[in-house]
Image: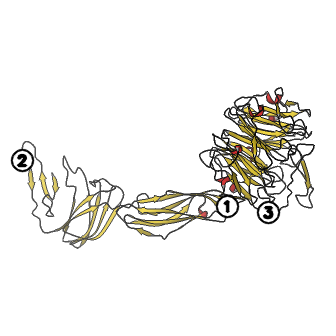
Amino acid sequence: SIWGDYNNDGDLDLFVANGDDEHNFLYDNLGNGNHWINIKCNGEVSNNSAIGTKIRVHANINGRPVSQLQEISSQTGLRSQNSLNAEFGLNDAPVADSMIIEWPSGITQRLINVQADQFITFHEEFTSLAISPQTLDFGIVPIGSHKMLLAIITNSGNGDLIISNILISGSNPAEFSYTAIVPDTLPPDSAKQLIVNFSPEGGGTKSANLIIESNTLSSPDTINLAGISTRQIMQKIMDGPVVNDSLPSCGGSWGDFNNDGYIDLFVASDSGFNNLLYRNNGDGTFTQITDGEIVNDGGHSRSASWADFDNDDDLDLFVANSNGEDNFLYVNNGDGSFVKITEGEIVNDGGHSTSAAWGDFDNDGFLDLFVANENEEDNFLYQNNGDGTFSKIRNSAAVNDGGTSQGCNWIDFDNDRDLDLFVANGFPNNERNFLYRNDSLGNFTRIISGSSIAVDAANSMGGSWGDYDNDGDLDLFVTNQSGQNNFLYRNDGDQGFSRISSAVIANDGGNSNGSAWGDFDNDGDLDLFVANDDNQNNFFYFNNGNGTFSKNLEANIALDGGSSRAVIWGDVDHDGHPDLFVSNHGSSNSNNFLYLSTPGIRHWINLKLVGSVSNRTAIGTKVRLKARIRGAAQPAVWQVKE
């Protein structure tokens, strides 16, 4: 048997199904004049038939409050189902005082003073809060400034959206704020803007959650907030060709090729692109040079090195090329133009060259050239004949140790006034690096024991030498790839080195390429910048002046990166403070970086040396300077630069 108002007269009629071939019964309810309400529910979030919905009706019947409850059901008895409408008898009550509809979704609708004797269709009233975007990334914001972003809150439901509260929680809630009036009501299909502000108080990566409480089923809803705060220790240049030529840059080299007193910039480009030469205008800006072979020889260039190899008082340039290509040598004409050398083994050896370094290893006053090669090829050593030509050295230990060489440096690590040689090997084959000692006659012996430099194997990319502890001898930092920690070796002054393994500078496993020592704050101690790729920020280590380093997580120069390769310090604008260039390679962050220092109150000296008996560029010269950099009451400190 089932009940239902089949004739819509407000009374429940009855149908009875009979078996044994008997006729079924249908009884028409003739009514008695009592009041009623017939309710049909259509689900929106819940099922369309509203099965499972509870309806509560409260009315004053025969002088007393009465509550009735019905639930929409698909089965109400044996083999039977009542109407999906809910009918309530109200007797003598012409009005239902209140009606509560509890949908299966959890949504509840409330009505008051509902007139009796009517059919009512209720659609499930719901609110839906949509947020766009769901994450607000403020990017890099300097400490002391702020940045605002907008989020759009939309009510895509059919009922009023009531925002009851907004709050911010998470790691750094105090550094984020919002502008909005709460509580607030949004009608269906309307939207409002929510202004969110990021005002960093300290450096580093910041995050928080903006939580929106409302009458939606999804409440509370969350907007993820993220930002990076920096201290602007250097000014990042955003305009000009140096930072807007988006090419796969590998190496960078400072050199005053036109002898106007300002360092110019050469950038080695990979993947068949032309190399880049920028002339320093003397005001912190640069002009790109577009004429001449020096900027029109497209190839797979990896690095470049300036030097006056012919001692004619202007800088010439060597470019190391990979991918089986010949290397380039350009002679400076003295008027800002260059001639490309095409004869001689130095430009016809072809190979997979990665870096090159000029140095007068035989102390004859003319610069020789070492070239590092990868792909397990022997490295190249070219001896300067003093007449503009070179002879290739074939019988030296320095050129018979094949490897995957990536970087090279001439350096007098043992203070015997001849140039020794370091070669960084490994990537991607996890090899040992090479350290060769010069016997003062131009003969090299590879150091294979007694020093961790000789036995440490890694995917090394390059080395940077500098006296970071001001003890008068040059120490070594080596960059490594493949998530390996970088190496820091302290020169012990007895031709041996100690590897520093407990410092932060040697425990930041990553994907490091280039590195460069530079006293960026002119306090007399060398600081270190490391260029990283594989979507990793670059590293900047501040020298504490006691042989230790602090990693600067707030500096703006350490919060850029992602595909950086080479890094070089140089005083671009002659203000006595070192500026910084970083070359980038890849699809992300492929524009190069140029940072100019902010003049400070510390004193400085900038020396340019010109050789006469020694090579004109003075490569290999050591300069020692003694000053009371810790204060007048403290002992004077020796600094050494080579």
Q: Which quadrant of the structure image shows residue 92?
A: bottom left
- 323 or 635: nearer the viewer: 323
- Is residue 24 something one can see in this rendering? yes
Establish if 141 lies above or below 622. Answer: below
> Measured from the top left, where is residue 369 in percent x and y?
81, 37
Comparing marks 3 and 1, which lies closer to the viewer? 3
Determine whether label 1 and label 2 are within 8 Å by CB: no
What count of labels does the image hold?
A: 3
Q: Which residue is mark 3?
A: 600
Tell me if label 3 and label 2 are in contact, CB under 8 Å: no
Measure the C-alpha gap from mark 1 to mark 2.
86 Å
Residue type highlighted by circle 1: Gly
Q: Which residue is mark 1?
A: 202
Q: Earlier in the sequence, mark 3 or mark 1?
A: 1
Lower sequence index among marks 3 and 2: 2
- C-alpha span from label 3 to label 2: 106 Å
Kind of element beneath mark 3: loop
The residue at which mark 2 appears reads as: 23
Please name the colour scheme applied to the rendered image.
secondary structure
State left or right for residue 62 relative to residue 140: left
Q: Callout 3: 10 Å neighbours few (<14), some, many (20+)?
A: few
Question: Which label sits in the foreground, 1 or 2?
Answer: 1
Name the side, left or right, on which 191 lies relative to 239: left
Residue density around tag 1, few if under 14, some if 14–19, many if 20 or more, within 10 Å: some
